[in-house]
Image (cartoon, grey):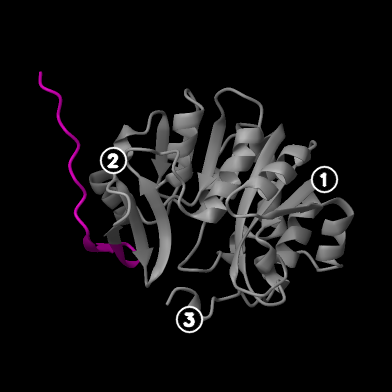
């Protein structure tokens, strides 16, 4: 039987469960594609090279993953979109078993139809929100949990609370690692509270971000890494400083000063979630 060639994606605007998204071709990379919603880029994938990571914050998360013990990983991803990191893990850690939770079923179907999601080995996608998906995962079933869930440009608050972090800890193995993508701007009030929340459950916590974002000079992404056992801090500091993004890794006393007594988040707390200024994606 002749091998069927993969279908070429069709750029355009597509209806999904929660609105519409734009599927855009990267003019600099023929196999690169971006999913954008309301003008906010949500995911970038290179269909021919899943190890190419265009978004800087995704590269920071991948750098941490590369420092974890070698071999296949059991990974839970809360937030999927085009499944950039699941593709990366499948390519760099063959044999890994991965579960992705994505509440937008029509978006998942779009990615299956247009962006070759079925080609990613040992990947299961569940059409569930983050809390429901995590509650359905077995105890001590994951080496890594990646929390990268956004509604537009904001993180769902129910995925940033102490109650949810307790469920994440239940799912992770004793030496498992949590990676969280936060977006914040001036003052970094929300980021500090998320860090305080993570720190109530995980003893070892570090923060990765570009210096300008860390100083609150501009809105951007910050990556939290956490575990109940020691993190590979030496490698994290080295790769952050030596990467293309020139990020910083904040940990220990410096991180304690950064958090500076910010209160943890609990279910039901009134919180203003940071929204990027229009110029960020304009």
Instruction: Please state which of residues 8 and 49 is positioned toward the viewer in this rendering.
Output: 49
Tell which tag, 2 or 3, sits nearer the viewer: 3
Q: In this view, does 244 lie above or below 64?
A: below
Question: In the visual, does 133 lie left or right of 190?
Answer: left
Please identify the quadrant where the N terminus is shown: top left
Which residue is painted at 64% across and 54% down in the image?
A: 246
Q: Give percent across and percent down for residue 79.
A: 48, 52
- Residue 64, numbered label: none
Which residue is painted at 68% across and 35% down in the image?
A: 176
- Residue 278, numbered label: 3
Question: In the visual, does 45 lie left or right of 172?
Answer: left
The image quadrant of residue 104 is bottom left
Magenta residues (range):
1-22
Is residue 252 inside the magenta stretch?
A: no
Report crowding for label 2: few under 14, some 14 to 19, many 20 or more residues within 10 A (C-alpha). Answer: some
The image quadrant of residue 218 is bottom right
Question: In the visual, does 226 lie left or right of 120?
Answer: right
Alpha carbons under labels 1 and 2: distance apart: 39 Å
Residue 220 appearing in the image: yes
The image quadrant of residue 158 is bottom right
Please identify the quadrant where the C terminus is shown: bottom left
- Label whose residue precedes the other's in the sequence (2 or 3): 2
According to the picture, the residue beneath numbered tag 1 turns out to be: 203
Alpha carbons under labels 2 and 3: distance apart: 32 Å
Which residue is painted at 45% across and 68% down in the image?
A: 152
Report crowding for label 3: few under 14, some 14 to 19, many 20 or more residues within 10 A (C-alpha). Answer: few
Tell which tag, 1 or 3, sits nearer the viewer: 3
According to the picture, the residue beneath numbered tag 2 turns out to be: 116
Instruction: Please state which of residues 162 and 181 is positioned toward the viewer in this rendering.
Output: 181
Which residue is painted at 16% across and 33% down in the image?
A: 5
Q: Give percent across and percent down for residue 122.
A: 41, 28
């Amino acid at each position: 039987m002749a091998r069927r060639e993969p279908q070429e994606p069709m750029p355009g605007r597509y209806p999904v469960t929660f609105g519409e998204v734009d599927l855009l071709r990267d003019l600099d990379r023929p196999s690169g594609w971006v999913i954008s919603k309301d003008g906010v880029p949500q995911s970038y994938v290179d269909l021919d090279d899943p190890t190419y990571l265009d978004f800087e914050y995704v590269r920071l998360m991948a750098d941490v993953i590369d420092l974890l013990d070698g071999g296949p990983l059991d990974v839970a991803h809360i937030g999927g979109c085009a499944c950039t990191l699941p593709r990366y893990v499948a390519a760099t850690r063959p044999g890994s078993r991965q579960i992705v939770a994505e509440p937008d079923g029509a978006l998942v179907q779009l990615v299956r139809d247009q962006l070759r999601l079925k080609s990613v080995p040992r990947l299961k996608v569940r059409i569930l929100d983050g809390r429901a998906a995590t509650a359905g995962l077995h105890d001590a079933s994951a080496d890594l949990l990646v929390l990268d869930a956004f509604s537009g440009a904001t993180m769902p608050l129910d995925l940033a609370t102490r109650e949810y972090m307790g469920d994440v800890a239940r799912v992770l193995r004793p030496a498992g690692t949590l990676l969280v993508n936060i977006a914040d701007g001036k003052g970094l009030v929300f980021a500090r509270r998320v860090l305080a929340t993570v720190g109530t459950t995980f003893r070892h916590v570090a923060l990765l971000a570009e210096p300008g974002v860390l100083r609150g000079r501009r809105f951007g992404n910050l990556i939290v890494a956490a575990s109940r056992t020691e993190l590979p801090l030496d490698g994290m500091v080295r790769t952050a400083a030596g990467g293309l993004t020139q990020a910083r890794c904040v940990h220990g006393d410096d991180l304690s000063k950064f958090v500076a007594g910010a209160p943890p988040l609990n279910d039901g707390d009134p919180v203003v979630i940071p929204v990027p200024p229009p110029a960020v994606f304009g």
